[in-house]
Amino acid sequence: MRWWVRCLGTAVRHAALEQARNRLALVLVLFFIPLWLNLAYWVLPGDPVRFFLRAAGRPVSLDANTVTQLSGALHSLALIVGFMMFLATGRSAGFDHRLVLAGYPRLCLLLARSGVLLVTAALTAGYATAWVCAFYLPERLDVMAGAFMVGALTYGGVGILLAAMLRSELAGMFVVIMVSLIDLTLQNPVANPSADSPLLRWLPAYGAMQGAVSAVGLGAVPWRQLLLGLCWSAGLTAAGVVAFTARTSRRASVRALLGRRVTGPALRMVTLRLLHPVRARVYRQAGVHDAVVVKGYEICRRLVRRSGPVEAAVPQLFPARLRPVLWAVYGYGRHLDDLSDTRRLGRRDRYERVSRFGALLEADLRRGHSEDPLRAAVVHALWTWDLPGDGMAATDRVYRQDAQGTSALATWDDWSAYWHALTFPFGVKRLLNLFTAPGLAFVPTDAEALRAWTDAFNLLDTLRDLREDAAEGFVKLPSAVLDEYGVSAGDLARGQAAGRFADMVHAMTARARQWLEQATTAGAQHPPLAAALRTVVELHLLELDRIDRNPRALLKGPSRADPVRFHCTLARGRFRVARAWRRHARSAPHLPPTVTLPQPAADSPAAPDTRPLLPPVPHAGGARPPRLPAHLRPRHVAIIMDGNGRWAVRRGLPRTAGHDAGQRAVRETVYGALEIGLPCLSLYSLSTENRERPAAEIEAILRLFQDGLDTETEEVWRRDVRLRWSGVPEGLPPDLVRSLRRTEHLTRDRTGLTLNMCVNYGGRDEIAHAARALARQVADGALSPDAITPRHVAAQLHLPDLPDVDLLIRTSGEQRTSNFLPWQSTYAELVFLDTLWPDVDRTHLWQAVAAYARRDRRFGTTRSTPGTPGEHPFQG
C-alpha cells in the first residue's frame, strides 16, 4: 500500500510540474480572461437581447454585453484548459510510458491526470468567476462557478482526447480553437439569433452555457443541463483514458521498445517489468538493476521454488530488499547439490563440475563481477551486503564428496555433522551476517533456535528426497535407523515399503516436530524474526501432517501439504510478519550479535589465499622504526592530513597539485605504520565541511580517491592492509561509494593493518547519527532512556569495532582537531607537527609514536600509566 501511495505521489507531482511548466497557459489565465471580459463589457452595447432559454423553458432578456461576457468567459476557459491538458498529456506521454514499464500502476497515472484536471478546472473557473463578479454580482454565484467548472472540465477532457490522437502541438491548438469557436459562438444569442435551436443541446458546452445564463437571469439551478455538461466531460475524459490505456499497454510498450532494437539482457529486463511487475519492484527496492544479475537472481529463485513450497515461501516473509540475497544464498547450495547429484554423469565428471564451479566463483568474488548469471547473483549478494565468503571451501568440499559418493551415515551424530557441514559454513553463517548488516531491523540472539529449525528442515528434506537419494545409492538417514525398522536402501530405490517403513516415517516426523517445538520456544528473539520463524514452523507442521497421513506416498515422490491450508497459513503469517516489521523496522542496533554457532567437526577453515604478501617498501634513506614494546605502542593512530593547499601555493602550483603530492605521504605513512606494527590507522581524507571548498578542488580530490582505489586495491591487499571507510555516502559520486565498498570487501580478511579512510566524514554528524539510532530504539520500546550509557553511544558509531584513538597527529602547524573523531579521541594524546602533509614521511610518524610512548596516561585518575593504550571508562 505504501508503495502504491508513493507511485501516486510521483505521478501527481509529475503531472503538476507539467502544468506549472506551461508558462504560456499561465499567462493566458492571468491576462486573457480579464481582457476578454473587459472588451465584451466596454465594446458591446448594453442593449437587452431577448432569447429562449431552454433551462427555464421560457424567453428571457439580458444585456448583450452580459451574455457576451458569459460566452467569452466560457470560451477563454475552453481554450486555456483544453490547451493546457493537451500539452501536459502529450508532453508526458514518454514519461508515462516509462513509468508503466517500470511497474507503476496505470491507475495511479490516471488518477493523477484526473486530479490535476479537476484542480486546474476549479482554479481557472474560480478565477473567471471572480472577474465576472467585478462587473456585476450574479443571483446564484455558486451556479455560475459550477457552470464555468463544468465547461473547463469538458474541454479538459477534449484536450486529453486530442493528446492521444494528435502529435503536433500546433494541430492540437488549432483543433481546440475551432471546436470551442463553433461550440460557443453558436450558443451566443448576440452572434446567433437561432441560439435556441434544439440541435445546440448536443454541443459540448451547452450545459455550461445554460447554467451560466441561468445563474445571472433566473437564480435557479439547471440540474439537467449541468448534468448533461458533466456527462460530456466524463465521456470525453473516458475516451482520453481509453486512448491513454491503449498507448501505454504492454503491446504498445513492447512495440515501442522493439522499435529501439532492445535485445539481449535489456529485453529480458523489459519482459520482467511487463509480465512480472511485482518481482520487478522487488529488484528495484533491492537496488538490482543489472540485467545479468537479475537473470541470475531469477535462476536462484526458480531453484528455490523447485525445492518446495516452504522454501519458496520463506523469502516472502522478509522485506523485498532482502529477498534476492536469500534466493542467492539458497540457490548457491541448491545448484551445488544439482551438480553433485546429476545422474547422467559419472562420479568423476560430477566431481570436476563441482570443483570448477567453486574455483570460478572464488575468482569472480575477487573480481567483483561475473559473466555467468548465477555466479553474478551470488557475487552481487555478497558484495552488496558485505557478506564474507569464508565457508565456501568447506561447503564445496562436502559437495565434492557427495559427487564421489559419500559413505553411509551410521548414527545421528554423523547425520548432524554431514548436514551442518553443508548448511552452517556458508549458508547459515551468511544469513546471520545478513541479519546484522547495517540498516536491517533484527538481530537473532538464540543460536539454539536456529540450529533446531535447520535440523528439522534438513530432516524434512531427507524425507522428501528419500526415494531419489536411494536411487543414487546414498540414503541420508542414519544406518542405525534403517536397521532398527528393517528398511533397506534397495527397497527404497524400488519404491517398496519393506519392514516397518511407516513406523520409521512416524518416528522421523516426531523427531522433526520436537526440533520445531524447540525452534519456537527457545529464548527471546526480535519480533520480526520470531514471527517469520513461527510461520515457517507452521508450514513445516502442515507438511508433516500430510506425511503422517500417508507415509507410503514418500516412495512416489515428495509429499506436499494441502494447498488451501498452506496458502491460508502463509497469508496469515505474512500479515503477522508484515505487522511486526512495521513496528520494529527502525530499531537497527549496530551491536554485533552475541551468537555462538555450533561448529561441526567437518567444518574446517576455508583454503587460504596462496598469493605471497609483500613487505613494506624500505625507507629511501634507510631509516628503521624505533623498537618499542607492544604495550607502549598505540593501538589506534589518527592523522589530520593538513597543508596540501599551502604546500602547492608556496611553490606557485594550483592547490590540486598539493593533493596529488599528498598521496606519496599517505603511502609513506602506511608503510611506516606497517613497519612499527600499528594495528589501526585513521586518515582524515575529506570532511563534510571540506565540501564547501571550490568545486574544482573537490572534484580533483574525489578523482584522486577514485583513481587510487582503482589502481591501489591490489597493492593494499598484498601489503596485508584492510581498508575501512568512515563517512556518509550522501554527496559522494556513486562510483566512488561502490569502489570504497568493493575495496572494503576485497580486503576484509587482511590482518596486518586496518586503514580507516575518513571520506566525507564529520564527527558531530557521526554522534548525531548515533543519537538518532538510540532515539529510535527508545521510541520503539527496545531501550530505556535511563539505561543509555556511553557504551550504547559508541556502539552506534560508524565503525564501533575499532578501538578508541590513542594518538592524534595533525600536520601543518595548526593546533585544533577540526571535528575529527571527537568521541573516539576523548583521551587521545595530541601531537602537532609543523611539517606540511606532502613533506611528511614515515619518520615523522615514528617520532610521534616515540613521543607517545614517553607520556603518562591517567584517564582522569591519579594512576600514572606510561603510554599504555589501555581500556578507559568510555572505551567503545
Image (spheres, rainbow, N blue to C red):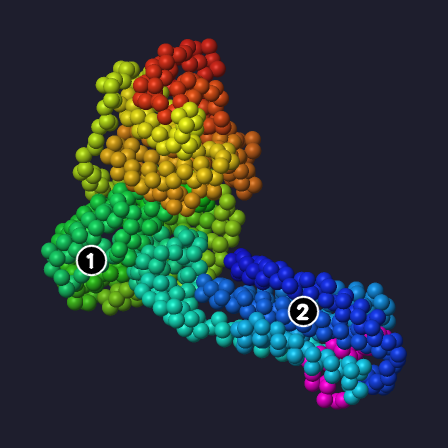
- The CA distance from mark 2 to mark 1 is 68 Å
Amino acid type at image mark 2? Ile
Crowdedness near tag 2: few (<14), some (14–19) or many (≥20) residues, C-alpha within 10 Å: many
Instruction: State the residue at coordinates (42%, 32%).
Output: 654
Please, is residue 487 above or below residue 704 in the view?
below
- Mark number for residue 80? 2
SS state under label 1 = helix
Q: In this view, does 20 lie to the left or right of 519?
A: right
Q: Range of the magenta residues? A: 197-223
Q: Where is residue 464 in the image (x, y as percent from the top left)?
A: 27, 61
The stretch drawn in magenta includes residue 212: yes
Query: What residue is pinned by disc 1?
Result: 339
Q: Which of marks 2 and 1 is nearer the N terminus?
A: 2
Q: Can residue 300 be seen in this view?
A: no
Instruction: State the residue at coordinates (75%, 71%).
Output: 73
Q: Can residue 529 be seen in this view?
A: yes
The stretch drawn in magenta includes residue 476: no
Q: Where is residue 526 in the image (x, y as percent from the top left)?
A: 45, 44
User: 616 and 409: which one is in front?
Assistant: 616
